[in-house]
Image: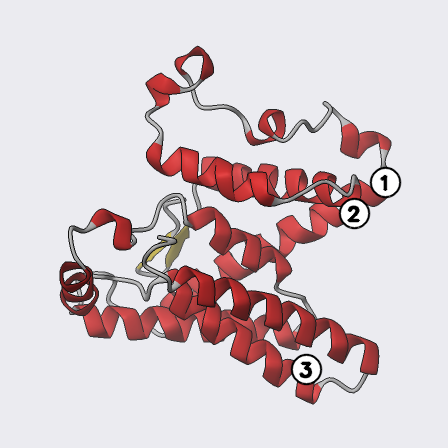
Amino acid sequence: MGFYAAGDAVVLPVAGLKFIEDLTMAYAWRYRQQRTLEPLDEYLAMLRWKPESEWPGGAYLDPLEVFGVPPGAWERDASLAELGTSLRNEAWAFVLAHELAHVLYAHPGNSAPAATSQANEAQADAFAMALMESTDTLPLGAFLYFQATLAFYTSRADFPSDDAYARWQREQATHPVNAQRLMAIAQQLQLWARRAADEDRRAVLFDIGDKMEQFATGLKDPAMQ
């Protein structure tokens, strides 16, 4: 998941792109099968906290295997392939647009002071969202991307106290925490909805924004972290 911009180049590791693809396909399959989606969060928490040696066979399990997606399911089901591909493309589009924003604005990278770096990340998120709105692209896949990053980003659980966590955010964090980023995206979606001419699309945007806002609110809870 080490996506970054360096000078005028954007680096997107293939392993990270493939991980996003597998997660979005697994999500699409479980959604189509009307199965619960909670295992997605459980799997990501296991990646974050369970040592690889304690996994079955001593190795991390593939997302498609974990979620019971039959091999080649998307090849036999065109609608599943369409949903999974749409979610994947939305996630990839957000990541790419975010990193391109760093190039466009000539951001100095994470060597900048914490407050500057976090402001740059927020600006890159806003650029990605504006670009997605201009191309009429729903950011649901981006939401799944942020869920995926929960397995990798620092949270309250990494610190001995609330004060230590707050100090890290003020002095060292290179990115706004996920709750803040998702809340900002949710607010932008509400603006999208108000600008949407189509009533059905307006309802969809409000619905996605509301779900993101609820998720972000939950992420703010130190006990949950």
Instruction: Name the quarter where the N terminus is drawn.
Output: top left
On the picture, is 72 further left or further right than 159?
Answer: right
Q: Secondary structure at mark 1?
A: helix
- Closer to the N terminus: mark 1 or mark 3? 1
Give residue 162's position: percent from left, percent from top: 19, 61
Q: Amino acid at mark 1?
A: Ala
Q: Is residue 223 above or below residue 49?
A: below
Look at label 2 and name its amino acid: Glu
In the foreground, 77 or 179: 179
Q: Which residue is mark 1?
A: 78
Q: The disc labelled 3 sits on which kind of residue?
A: Ala
Return the residue found at the far top. 57
Q: Which residue is mark 2?
A: 82
How far apart are labels 2 and 1 at the CA level? 6 Å
Q: State the residue position of label 3.
A: 193
At x 85% / y 40%, what residue is drawn? 78
Up/down of 22 relative to 168, above or below: above
Q: Could you tell me which residue is drawn at 45 percent across and 69 percent down? A: 125
Rendered image quadrant of residue 200: bottom right
Res. 111 image quadrant: bottom left
Q: Give coordinates of residue 129: x percent, y percent.
A: 54, 72
Image quarter of residue 47? top left
Residue 2 in view here = yes
Q: CA distance from mark 1 to mark 3?
A: 29 Å
Mark closer to the chain start, 3 or 2: 2
User: Pointer 2: residues within 10 angstroms few (<14), some, or many (20+)?
Assistant: some
- On the image, the x and y values in percent for residue 61 come to 50, 23
Q: Is residue 184 left or right of residue 117?
A: right
Expressed as whole percent of the image width and height from the top left, the position of residue 150 reads: 41, 49
Q: Nearer the viewer, residue 19 or 11?
A: 19
Disc 2 and disc 1 in contact, CB within 8 angstroms: yes
